[in-house]
Amino acid sequence: MAIDKIQSESINLGDNFAFTGTVSGAGGVNTPAFYAHSDQVTTISASGSTKVSINTEIFDTAGAYSSSRFTVPSGQAGKYFFHFSVGLNSGTNINPVFPILFVNGSENTNGTRIRKYHNGSGGSIQTYAQSAFYNASAGNYFEVYFYNGNSSTKETYNSSQDTFFFGYKIIE
């Protein structure tokens, strides 16, 4: 369609258009992005927070996930969405326990958090999850910790369905 035709008529969005040049400024991609799950048990200390080993990468578009940690690459500052889940081997209700997103080695207090959910109060595996939005700068790093408010240690369940961590940059 010629430029003069577009200027003299309105565009019918029901029409089909064949572009032969490059279209820019349309769409976008949610990268960097990563997904990892656990294949080993982490012992969660009593009365405190412990970093969870989530060491098996499924994908990592920017090579920014390593040692159970995602680091925002240079030039990729922006808003990020993270979701993480931790399964515990447990036969009883063991509250207070929950996963926490740590940012640069400290508990996330600046991002918007969607608090934990819990899959029940009994059974052999308890699953806890949380999501967070965070306005990140290049070099910020994110890790999953688990808080155990009980007086005895707990162990994570090493399952790709129960203990995992993923995130991606939001298109703005």
Image (cartoon, helix red, strand yellow):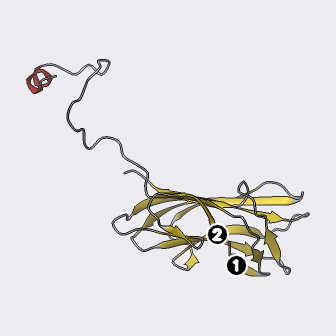
Instruction: Report the quarter where the N terminus lies.
Output: top left
Specify whether residue 136 is in view. yes
> For the point 40% across and 68% down, which residue is it?
73
Q: Position of residue 160 (x, y in %)?
A: 71, 57
Question: In the visual, does 69 lie left or right of 1?
Answer: right
Q: Where is residue 15 in the image (x, y as percent from the top left)?
A: 29, 18
Mark 2 surroundings: few (<14), some (14-19) or many (≥20) residues within 10 A: many
Label 2: which secondary element: strand
Q: 106 or 26, which lies in front?
A: 26
> For the point 72% across and 67% down, which residue is it?
98
Question: In the visual, does 66 lie left or right of 123?
Answer: left
Q: Quadrant of residue 53?
A: bottom right
- Count the marks: how many? 2
Q: Is residue 24 above or below residue 88?
A: above
Q: Is residue 108 above or below residue 27?
A: below
Label 1: which secondary element: strand
Whether the residues at callouts 2 and 1 have beta carbons within 8 Å, the answer is yes
State which tag comes first along the sequence, 2 or 1: 1
| Amino acid residing under circle 2 | Ile
Q: In which quarter of the image is residue 107?
A: bottom right
What's the distance in space between the residues labelled 2 and 1, CA to CA?
Answer: 8 Å
> For the point 81% across and 71% down, which residue is it?
155
Q: In this view, does 152 lie above or below 91?
A: below
Mark 1 surroundings: few (<14), some (14-19) or many (≥20) residues within 10 A: some
Q: Mark 2 points at which residue?
A: 100
| Amino acid residing under circle 1 | Ser
Q: Mark 1 points at which residue?
A: 49
Q: 62 or 15, which lies in front?
A: 62
Q: Position of residue 111 (x, y in %)?
A: 51, 66
Specify whether residue 115 is in view. no
